[in-house]
Amino acid sequence: MPVKPKAVALISGGLDSMLAARVVQQQGVHVEGINFFTGFCVEGHTHAIRKRDQARPKRNNALWVAEQLGIKLHIIDIIEEYKKVVINPKHGYGANLNPCLDCKIFMVGKAREWIAENDFDFIVTGEVIGQRPMSQRKDTMPVVARESGAEDRLLRPLCAKNLPPTLPEREGWVQRDQLFDFSGRSRKPQMALAEQFGFEDYAQPAGGCCFLTDRNYSAKLQDLWQARGTRDYELDDIMLLKVGRHIRPRPNFKMIIAREEGETRFLQGYRKSFIHMHPVSHRGPLVLIDGTPDADDLLLAARLTARYSQGRDAERVEVSVVRNGVSESLSVAPISSQEMPDEWHI
Amino acid sequence: MQSLNARYLLCPLPVIRVQDRVKLMQQGEVLEVVCTDPGTVHDIPAWCRINGHRVIESKYVDEEYTFTLEVGSRFADEP
């Protein structure tokens, strides 16, 4: 009996990678999935944190897709290694701090290492020429294959007919005439193929699946780098950028203000690592202080905290400040809107 | 039985921690994992189903989700 070829498919949780994996599966190839966790993934986190999102489904779409396809899924933590992609992308950023081309090269490169370690034959992605302005263009397709080291072991089943034949096609592991020639931003061919395969339910993330494509999130990351004087981050930094209202009244500190109960609960987990404050005379948010504030800065922060409490129109609000485990109470006047420039909002 | 603390981790990190631990375990061994992210209710059983492991028990007490898993064969469906 001939040996069944083996492929690993990059599974994002979206429709394209789901279809690409199924196309190859249908040709008798053994397929397993791989999914990379960068720390910037949108999926699940805001839902898990915010109380108002509690009713929304919290499933991990990559796992769900793997289950629909009946394949194993390997989820790989690349948080540390991925920093170099975000901090210094060779091919630059997209509209925000999204290094999409470098990201794709990095992930395909990791998949190449994985197939070498696990004795698999080739890599499958759901890329479509012209689908994404930065990473999925006719001229960037060979760049991804070359710079990832995957070369012709990288198969894009949805647009393969628009590209030169790859090793899996030349070796007969897959039949080229059963691959596709999708191109452009239209989703109609994918939706038609989904219907053909009987996929009725699939994720369609409106803004992609990465926080780095988000303008507000990118502004917060840029602010973090600028304030610290270095382009670096830890996982906790990038998680906290997903939560709360971020206000920087002075260059040496910023405030992370919980907007609702779920965010308060999430920020409570960080109280030991940050100076934190909350109103005690009125209902109000938990606030983390990131940076090196002096006594005058803390007074200003307390006035801002009072502004976001139910005492915003009161003459005085009592705010509890906890620093190095020591608590003190400040009585402050809530700051007025005239005293608070728009530029403070990150 | 082995145990794993995945409290305060957001998905998919609890799944990744389970996956990494199970790699070091033998078929038939049992792992108890404790999580706080409600997403684990879907994700950990789904990960077990697709990778050939079995959820023996799951419970929710005091805002914590505890799953007891039995490790299956990792080579079950390979060609």
Image: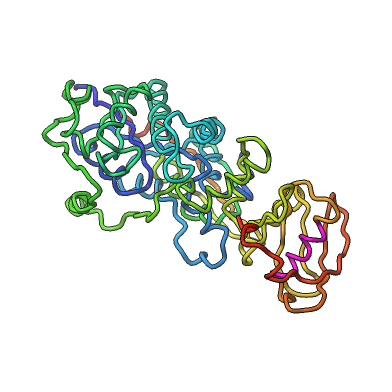
Q: Position of residue A47 (x, y in %)?
A: 51, 59
Give left or right: position of A113 versus A340.
Answer: left
Tell me what residue is drawn at x 56 percent, y 62 percent: A50
Asked if one can make out residue A226 in the rendered structure from this viewpoint, the answer is yes
Q: Position of residue A115 (x, y in %)?
A: 37, 24
Q: Work out whether A172 lies above or below A342.
A: above
Magenta stretch: helix, strand or loop mostly: helix
Q: Position of residue A155 (x, y in %)?
A: 26, 30
Asked if one can make out residue B3 in the rendered structure from this viewpoint, the answer is no
Q: How is the image coloured?
A: rainbow
Is residue A299 within the magenta segment?
A: yes
Q: Quadrant of the N terminus of chain A?
A: top left
Give left or right: position of A307 versus B53.
Answer: right
Q: Nearer the viewer, residue A259 or B19?
A: A259
Tell me what residue is drawn at x 54 percent, y 68 percent: A52
Which region shows up in magenta? Answer: A298-308
Tell me what residue is drawn at x 58 percent, y 44 percent: A222
Is residue A30 within the magenta segment?
A: no
Give left or right: position of A186 versus B3.
Answer: left
- Indicate the quadrant where residue A137 lies: top left
Q: Quadrant of the C terminus of chain A?
A: bottom right
Q: Nearer the viewer, residue A90 or A63?
A: A90
- Indicate the quadrant where residue A145 lies: top left
